[in-house]
């Protein structure tokens, strides 16, 4: 079953609801190793995205994601806005004007999102960033798609791998972002960006069922 603009908007709304639900958790994670603004910034950003979509739903999935991207980039400070915004923008560009997304398009969009985050943040797996959640998520999504999974199965695979990836940041020494200033003291803390990535992908997967 394909995924049209309305379904993509529903998925984004689920992501926004999950960010709002876990805002305090994300703030606490960021307070331990950063400046405690990740949860607040991301919640404000998704709220702005949903308000923009309430003002008029674009006709294609790519256009919906472009609204999300431009809103996050323009409305959110810190690292969350530029990184999430770039991820959505790269995905939107890859999807083009397709009216519906199949499993291959979902996997391709996730790969483009990862490439955008890596290009923007200059991080790689092992640096204790959102890349540690997003990279395994993309690989799992691509495997699920190759195995014949539908869009919901692709997102479910991505969500599961993202959760494992986020958990894997706990023993890592942060090498990017504000947490990297702490050096070894960052060990023992889950990365807020990786955690929010896993939460958002989990919400996307649940909504896509």
Image (cartoon, rainbow, N blue to C red):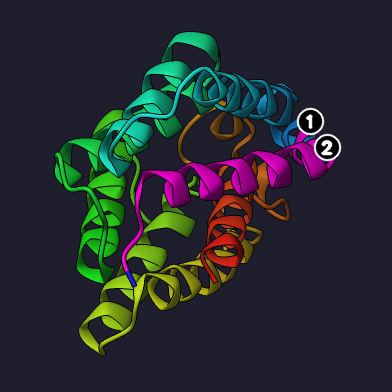
Q: Is residue 12 above or below residue 179?
A: below
Instruction: Place residue 48 in its image quadrant.
Output: top right
Q: Residues within 10 Å of mark 1 (few under 14, many from 20)?
A: some
The percent position of residue 70, horizontal first and vertical second, equals 37, 18
The percent position of residue 195, horizontal first and vertical second, equals 63, 51
**CB atoms at circles 2 and 1 under 8 Å apart?**
yes
Q: Quadrant of the N terminus?
A: bottom left
Q: Is residue 180 above or below residue 22?
A: above
| Residue beneath disc 1 | 31
* Mark 2 → mark 1, Cα distance in angstroms: 5 Å
| Residue beneath disc 2 | 28
Q: Is residue 194 above or below residue 137?
A: above
Query: Which circle marks residue 138 in the picture?
Result: none
Give the residue displayed 41% in from the left and 50% down from the top: 131
Which SS class for mark 2? helix
Which SS class for mark 1? helix
Evaluate whether residue 185 shows in this view. no
Evaluate whether residue 49 shows in this view. yes
User: Quick check: 33 left or right of 69?
Assistant: right
Q: Is residue 3 magenta?
A: yes
Q: Is residue 86 above or below residue 100?
A: above
Give the residue displayed 41% in from the left and 65% down from the top: 137
First to last magenta residue range: 2-29
């Amino acid at each position: 079953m394909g995924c049209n603009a309305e379904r993509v908007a529903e998925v984004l709304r689920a992501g926004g609801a999950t960010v709002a639900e876990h805002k305090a958790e994300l703030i606490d994670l960021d307070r331990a190793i950063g400046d405690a603004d990740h949860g607040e910034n991301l919640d404000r950003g998704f709220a702005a995205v949903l308000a923009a979509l309430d003002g008029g739903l674009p006709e294609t999935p790519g256009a919906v994601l472009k609204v999300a991207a431009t809103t996050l980039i323009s409305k959110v400070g810190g690292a969350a806005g530029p990184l999430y915004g770039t991820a959505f923008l790269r995905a939107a560009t890859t999807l083009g004007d397709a009216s519906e997304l199949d499993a291959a398009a979902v996997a391709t969009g996730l790969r483009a999102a990862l490439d955008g985050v890596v290009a923007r943040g200059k991080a790689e797996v092992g640096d204790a960033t959102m890349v540690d959640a997003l990279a395994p998520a993309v690989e799992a999504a691509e495997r699920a798609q190759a195995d014949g999974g539908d869009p919901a199965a692709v997102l479910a695979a991505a969500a599961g791998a993202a959760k494992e990836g986020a958990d894997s940041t706990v023993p890592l020494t942060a090498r990017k972002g504000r947490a990297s200033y702490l050096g070894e003291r960052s060990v023992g803390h889950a990365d807020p960006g990786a955690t929010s990535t896993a939460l958002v992908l989990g919400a996307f997967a649940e909504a896509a069922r």
